[in-house]
Every structure is written in structure tokens, then in C-alpha cells.
Amino acid sequence: MEHHVPIAVTDYNHVRLTVSDIDRSRSFYDSVFGFDVAYAWDPDADEETKKALWFLFGGVIYKFGGGLLGLRPVAPSDDTFAEDRCGLDHLSFTVDTRAALEDAVKTLDELGIAHEGIKDAGPGMSIVEFRDPDNIALELTGPDK
């Protein structure tokens, strides 16, 4: 039997979500999270720029403390996310304090985004669950106190 060496990863680099409408998704992610934009597709860019940014597939890549989050707008307009299919179950972002979770609930309420409030998720952890415009399950995870 051959001995293999496990791959020594140190962290996540990025996550990219497939979305159906980039304008709608950007509006949502911009208003909810306010991430900085690392790269964004510009349909009016010159051909050299478009070739250099081919990896965006017409979307955007945000940067934040946890890494990169991309939105790739290639899903059919009538498609919707389902966590019970192969692939992503949900995406959880970390917040540092219970107060940050409470502030997040206020932000979601102000934006009219449905959520389930702060829930106990086990010893020392609380979560807030909500969904993006394509029904992708999102979560905020923070301390319970």
C-alpha cells in the first residue's frame, strides 16, 4: 500500500457563489456586508482588460478579513439554490461579539431581509440565518455572550 502525505492547507482562499442576476446579488451583498471589491467585471472595459478578467465570468470578487467571496452570474434566471443537493449547504461568516450579532439583526430588519433571529448553536456559539436573493443559505456565527 502506498503512503500518501495529506495536503497541508492553511486556510480558505476564496468561495465563489453562482448567482442568477449579478445586479440583484451585488445590491444584496453590498448592502448587507459592504465588502470591498477586489475585482469587478466592466462590460464597457477594453478588450485587453476583459481578457485579463476572464475569471470573473461577468461577476465580482469581494475581499474581506476572511478571504475572498466571488459572485459568478451564470445560473439560469429561474434557478434557485437548494442546500439538499450536492454542493454547498450554507456559507457562514464570523462576527466577533454577541453585540455584532444583535447589530446584524437590526441591519437585516432595516433592509427587510427575513431571518430567524439569534439562535443558540451549542456551547459558546450563536447564529443568525438568512438567505440571499438566489435562496443561498447564509449564516452569521458569533459568541453566545
Image (spheres, rainbow, N blue to C red):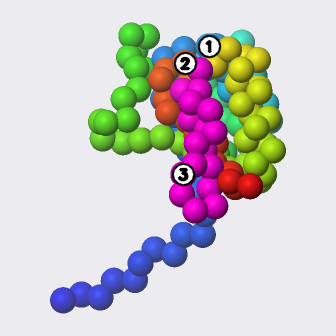
Give the residue displayed 64% in from the left and 19% down from the top: 113
- Please tell me whether mark 2 sits on a helix, a strand or a loop: loop
Identified by mark 2, the residue type is Pro
Residue 47 found in image quarter: top right
Task: Give whichever of 119, 133 is nearer the camera.
Answer: 119
User: In percent of the image, x 56 and y 30: which residue is there?
Assistant: 116
In this view, the mark in front (1 or 2):
2
Disc 3 is placed on an element classified as loop
Provide the secondary structure element on which disc 1 rests: helix
Residue 49 visible in rendering: no
- Say which residue label 3 marks: 121
Q: Which residues are magenta?
A: 114-131
The mark lying in front, picked from 2 and 3, is 3
Q: Earlier in the sequence, mark 3 or mark 1?
A: 1
State which quadrant residue 111 falls in. Answer: top right
Q: Which residue is mark 2?
A: 133
The residue pinned by badge 1 equals 24
Amino acid type, mark 1: Arg
The kind of residue on which mark 3 rests is: Ala
Question: In screen coordinates, is 144 left or right of 18?
Answer: right
